[in-house]
């Protein structure tokens, strides 16, 4: 217990990123659980509110599930990144005789210490947020009934949301047992070997999630091969309407489990294509490629990919299916949700992913400061160090966008293949405008973020930064 509290204090900057993710996830899950409880109350209140409440319940439950999955992924990636940053302290515990299970229990204890204030914040904010969430979705779905906030069943709904958030945090923490099992002193010193040994077993599990996601996307294909009645086709589509969303979540799980090799390969490929002979670019590229297999780098990329891929994949699936359905005889005037509708509907899930990006930047600040200190000792001037810090954010953001665009293309192509037996053509829609309009600001913001977080390190003595890194 004493070590857990000391570690929280000594690595407050690292644990701050974890705390931010826990607060946002816990608050959203609690508020949405309260909203669903209020909606259930109105569903059984009268005939007038029954049907609108049923329609609203399906939307709330879908977003609630998405927040749970993304929250688990983001918390898991953030915790793994924090463990990577605290590897020296964990190695010291191992030298003192602590077993991997004991270290896991200590990590769980630290997470519980942070979950407690996060839960208090969630309970305090959920009464105000629950009513706004109901109004938000009621307005978006054009439901004429107003669902006002009520304290009826608040305690049960709030405790349910807190329990789901707690289970999500515990599950995400428990998933780090593999990393903690590798945290021996020799592994810590040999960082490259550690990353390699961790990523290899994840690769197979990632393939399983990838396979399941593709199966879910292609599930209607054999059915459409034997159907010709428009009513039957529409019935199949309505049955598997949420299939692309669940497939996208499975693909994100696959990326989280085997993200090291994927992120590293993508970073190497696209940075090698940049026609620049600048020494600053070469240094920034080499640093990014070297760190691309680490969980600290990967946590930011995966969170950003989740944010972009969730919207881009749904746009690709919806647009592709709309074009195909309008070509089927007997089916006309089919429409799909646009970018604003998806942002409107999945704002809570996107907020969790966005907070994961911010937490990843906060946790990775220590590694970036150390790299800049070493470059400063090697002779780099302040202007070059500033440019390298900017390029670091540019590379991270661009890698996440490229992976999200690749996943979006895979979803669009799979959806087009599903409708091949009906229209005999592959008409795939790719949301170029979404990636261009959102991608450029994301890269700019990421570049500015790394520059601003690097400024305090540039004002400090490189020797002082190195002494802090080795614990002196």
Image: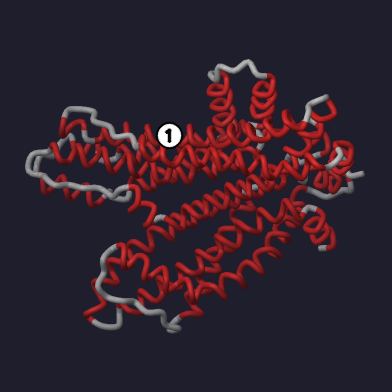
Q: Is residue 160 above or below residue 71?
A: below
Picture quadrant of residue 277: top right
> Can residue 180 be seen in this snapshot?
yes
Residue 429 left/right relative to 79: left
Picture quadrant of residue 152: bottom left
Residue lying farthest front?
A: 383
Where does the image place residue 238, in percent across and percent down from the top left?
Answer: 23, 51
Depth check: give the residue in front, 212 or 331.
331
Where does the image place residue 217, in percent across and percent down from the top left?
Answer: 33, 39
Q: Residue at the location (48% across, 37% down)?
A: 440
Q: Which residue is mark 1?
A: 405
Where does the image place residue 82, in percent across and percent down from the top left?
Answer: 70, 47
Number of numbered discs present? 1
> Can residue 212 be seen in this snapshot?
no
Location of the C terminus (image quadrant): top right
Q: Residue at the location (67% across, 48% down)?
A: 362
Residue 361 left/right relative to 153: right
């Amino acid at each position: 217990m004493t070590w857990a509290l000391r570690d929280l204090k000594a690595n407050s900057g690292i644990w701050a990123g974890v705390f931010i993710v826990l607060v946002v996830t816990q608050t959203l899950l609690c508020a949405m659980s309260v909203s669903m409880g209020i909606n259930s109350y109105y569903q059984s209140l009268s005939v007038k509110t029954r049907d609108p409440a049923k329609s609203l319940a399906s939307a709330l439950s879908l977003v609630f599930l998405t927040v749970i999955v993304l929250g688990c992924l983001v918390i898991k990636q953030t915790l793994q990144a924090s463990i990577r940053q605290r590897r020296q302290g964990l190695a010291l515990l191992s030298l003192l005789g602590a077993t991997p299970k004991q270290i896991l229990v200590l990590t769980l204890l630290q997470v519980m210490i942070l979950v407690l204030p996060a839960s208090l914040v969630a309970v305090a904010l959920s009464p105000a947020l629950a009513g706004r969430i109901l109004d938000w979705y009621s307005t978006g779905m054009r439901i004429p009934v107003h669902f006002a906030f009520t304290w009826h069943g608040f305690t049960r709904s709030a405790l349910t949301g807190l329990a789901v958030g707690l289970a999500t945090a515990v599950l995400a923490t428990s998933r780090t047992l593999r990393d903690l099992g590798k945290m021996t002193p020799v592994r810590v010193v040999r960082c490259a070997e550690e990353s390699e040994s961790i990523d290899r077993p994840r690769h197979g599990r990632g393939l399983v999630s990838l396979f399941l996601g593709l199966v879910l996307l292609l599930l209607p294909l054999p059915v459409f091969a034997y159907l010709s009645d428009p009513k039957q086709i529409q019935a199949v589509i309505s049955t598997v309407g949420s299939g692309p969303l669940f497939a996208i979540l499975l693909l994100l799980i696959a990326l989280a489990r085997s993200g090291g090799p994927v992120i590293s390969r993508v970073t190497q490929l696209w940075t090698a294509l940049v026609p620049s002979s600048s020494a600053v670019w070469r240094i920034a590229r080499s640093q990014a490629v070297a760190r691309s297999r680490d969980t600290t780098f990967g946590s930011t990329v995966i969170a950003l990919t989740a944010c972009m891929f969730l919207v881009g994949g749904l746009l690709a699936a919806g647009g592709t299916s709309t074009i195909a359905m309008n070509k089927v005889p007997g089916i006309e005037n089919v429409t799909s949700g646009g970018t604003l509708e998806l942002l409107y509907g999945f704002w809570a899930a996107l907020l969790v992913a966005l907070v994961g990006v911010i937490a990843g930047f906060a946790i990775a600040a220590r590694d970036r400061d150390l790299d800049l200190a070493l470059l400063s000792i090697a002779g780099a001037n302040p202007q070059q160090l500033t440019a390298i810090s900017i390029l670091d954010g540019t590379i991270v953001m661009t890698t996440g966008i490229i992976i999200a665009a690749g996943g979006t293309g895979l979803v669009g192509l799979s959806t087009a293949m599903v409708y091949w037996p009906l229209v005999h053509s592959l008409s795939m829609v790719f949301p170029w405008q979404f990636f261009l309009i959102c991608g450029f600001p994301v890269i700019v913001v990421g570049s500015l973020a790394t520059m601003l977080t690097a400024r305090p390190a540039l004002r400090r003595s490189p020797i002082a930064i190195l002494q802090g890194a080795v614990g002196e």
